[in-house]
Amino acid sequence: MFKSYDDEKTFQLITAACKVSGLPLETVLEVFGQTWLKFCMDNGYEEMLRTLGGDFTSFVQNLDALHAHLSRTYTKLNYPSFRCETNNDGTLTLHYYSKRSGLYYIVLGVIPQIASVLYNQKATITVDSREEQDIENGILDDHVIFTVKLSKNDGNTTVNNKEDSSTIENNKELVCIRPTFPKQTIIQAKHFCNIFPYHLIFDENFVIKQCGSMIQILLKTKMERGSSLTSLFDLTYPRVDFTLTNLMAFINSAFLMTSVKKRNGHSLVLKGQMRWMPDISHMIFISSPCISSLQELKAMDLYISDIPLYDVTRELILLNQQRMAEMEIA
Ligand code: HEM
């Protein structure tokens, strides 16, 4: 079941489906998209799909995380990436990137299903533009931009932002509370760097402005203001060139960065989230060391205590250790 097939086989299967049904490729893919959600729900993923997002937008913004999670079970995945923006008129602009060309008709089929089955809304989706984008050393990604118009089942267009009434329906208790923020942060930079030891803040030119304490200790490098992120780290996931445009395009992905400098022959791999801060035009990368066993921890000359208590990487390492011990006994 968890076997992965060459793309060639998948495309052969689609061509055969076209021949048997007499339908054009676009229709076959769209119909596949229309049945995909129900198929996944009927095959053990219903709870996961129903809990992914409180509203349609949050669902789409977390599709990358869903596929990334699946890649733990299904190996060698080459999953697509989704990102959406809310427009002033209440419509959504949906970006889809795929290493496979021409599969975007699946999106045309699956998006209305998500709106209807999970959020009791009607979605109209149209293709705005399609281009092949060079994102990794000349490798092209299919980048398709869609407009999604959501309406309640009575036909009225709904606005997709958090103040929207449809969101309130799905998320009643959350939107009642509007967070307040202090005028200035009361925490000093050094405390921030110690509390979040694996974070980095950098500007549009990848100049590091702030760096967590453990990154500096592990790389044996004092991050002076002005150090360049791209000379210290390679971007290993998503497989795109290390440019700001690409970071923004894949902002919903989990990012993996690998240190150029090695420690005990091992690179430091950080896994985390990028958040763009538009008011100051800086990006923050909040991460954890990408370690899943005590062996890897030892190899990096790290201790459990080097991972903050709030970071679930601790639990992951210990859980994995326990699982391996149980397997040895069995
Ligand atoms: C739990 C539910 C889901 C599962 C188990 C799942 C699983 C997968 C898998 C295994 C692939 C193939 C990736 C590869 O072979 O490299 C894939 C691709 C894809 N998934 Fe999902 N997926 C799920 C939900 C969704 C949803 C809700 C969407 C809605 C937009 C979606 C959109 C796509 C698309 C468009 C592709 C096409 C591949 C491409 O563009 O290269 N998936 N998914």
Image (tube, rainbow, N blue to C red):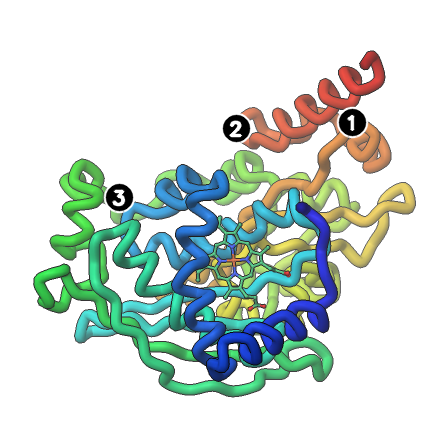
What residue is pinned by disc 2?
310
Q: Secondary structure at mark 1?
A: helix
Comes first in the chain, label 3 or label 2: 3
Asked if the residues shown at circle 1 and circle 2 are in contact, with their CB atoms under 8 angstroms apart, the answer is: no
For residue 326, the mark is none
Counting from the top left corner in percent of width and height, residue 72 is at 65, 44
What residue is pinned by disc 1?
294
Comes first in the chain, label 1 or label 3: 3
Quadrant in the rendering for residue 158: bottom left
Asked if the residues shown at circle 1 and circle 3 are in contact, with their CB atoms under 8 angstroms apart, the answer is: no
Report the label total. 3
Amino acid at circle 1: Leu
Q: Tell me if mark 2 has few (under 14), some (14-19) or many (20+) residues whose alpha carbon lies within 10 angstroms of its own.
A: few
Q: Tell me if mark 1 has few (under 14), some (14-19) or many (20+) residues whose alpha carbon lies within 10 angstroms of its own.
A: some
Counting from the top left corner in percent of width and height, residue 9 is at 71, 69
Which one is in front in this view, the residue at disc 1 or the one at disc 2?
1
What residue is pinned by disc 3?
182
Asked if the residues shown at circle 3 and circle 2 are in contact, with their CB atoms under 8 angstroms apart, the answer is: no
Counting from the top left corner in percent of width and height, residue 12 is at 67, 74
From what the image shows, is residue 115 above or below residue 107? above
Whether ligand 1 has any atom under 8 Å from the Cβ at mark 3 is answered as: no
Amino acid at circle 2: Tyr
Q: CA distance from mark 1 to mark 2?
A: 18 Å
Counting from the top left corner in percent of width and height, residue 126 is at 32, 80
Q: At 28% from the left edge and 58% from the top edge, which residue is drawn?
A: 115
Amino acid at circle 3: Pro
Q: At 48% from the left edge and 73% from the top edge, which residue is drawn?
A: 29
Quadrant in the rendering for residue 93: bottom left
Q: Tell me if mark 3 has few (under 14), some (14-19) or many (20+) residues whose alpha carbon lies within 10 angstroms of its own.
A: few
Q: CA distance from mark 1 to mark 3?
A: 40 Å
Which one is in front in this view, the residue at disc 1 or the one at disc 3?
1
Q: At 21% from the left edge and 58% from the top edge, which residue is drawn?
A: 121
